[in-house]
Image: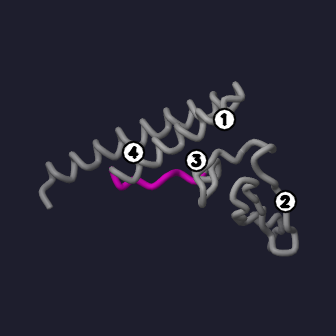
Amino acid sequence: MRASIKKERDVQKEITDERVRILFSKVEEAAREKDISQADYLIGIAREIGKKNNVRMPREYKRLYCKNCYRFIRSAKRSKTRINSKNHRVEVTCLYCGKTMFYPIKSGKKTS
């Protein structure tokens, strides 16, 4: 692959990352203003931009929406969050579609 093509792809990724970051800041803003439908819409746009340019969504953004119905779930009205200490994970259930997502909890144990 030529260096110019690789450089062009890197520039395109940077632009896409910046746009996704801006859109998710707007999502947070809309959620604070209680405009959840706008937040859902902006999440859809951010996902489309990321997919179109083949860019991975950062972890902190992925956890803001449901993996099944792509709705904003950070709000307590839209999701149920539980800590499962036995399996060392956080369980987030979307109240729209019923999908449960699991996120690992880092162990607080120190090994000597």
Q: Quadrant of the C terminus?
A: bottom right
Q: Residues within 10 Å of mark 3 (few under 14, many from 20)?
A: some
Q: Position of residue 44 (x, y in %)?
A: 50, 45
Q: Position of residue 30 (x, y in %)?
A: 63, 29
Mark 2 and mark 3 residues within 8 Å of each other at the beta carbon:
no
> Residue beneath label 4, please?
49
Q: Closer to us: mark 3 or mark 1?
A: 1
Residue 88, placed above or below residue 24: below
What amino acid is labelled 1 in the image? Ile
Q: Quadrant of the N terminus?
A: bottom left
Mark 1–mark 4 distance (CA, rounded to whole Å)? 20 Å
Q: Which residues are magenta?
A: 53-59
Q: Residues within 10 Å of mark 2 (few under 14, many from 20)?
A: few
What amino acid is labelled 4 in the image? Ile
Mark 2–mark 3 distance (CA, rounded to whole Å)? 19 Å
- Provide the secondary structure element on which disc 3 rests: helix
- Closer to the chain start, of discs 1 and 2, is 1
> Residue beneath label 3, please?
61
15 horizontally vs 111: left or right: left
- Residue 54 in magenta? yes
Relative depth, front residue between 89 and 79 = 79
Q: Closer to us: mark 1 or mark 4?
A: 1
Q: Residue furthest top?
A: 33
Mark 1 and mark 2 residues within 8 Å of each other at the beta carbon:
no
- Provide the secondary structure element on which disc 4 rests: helix
Looking at the image, which residue is at 78% across and 67% down? 89
The quarter holding residue 91 reads: bottom right
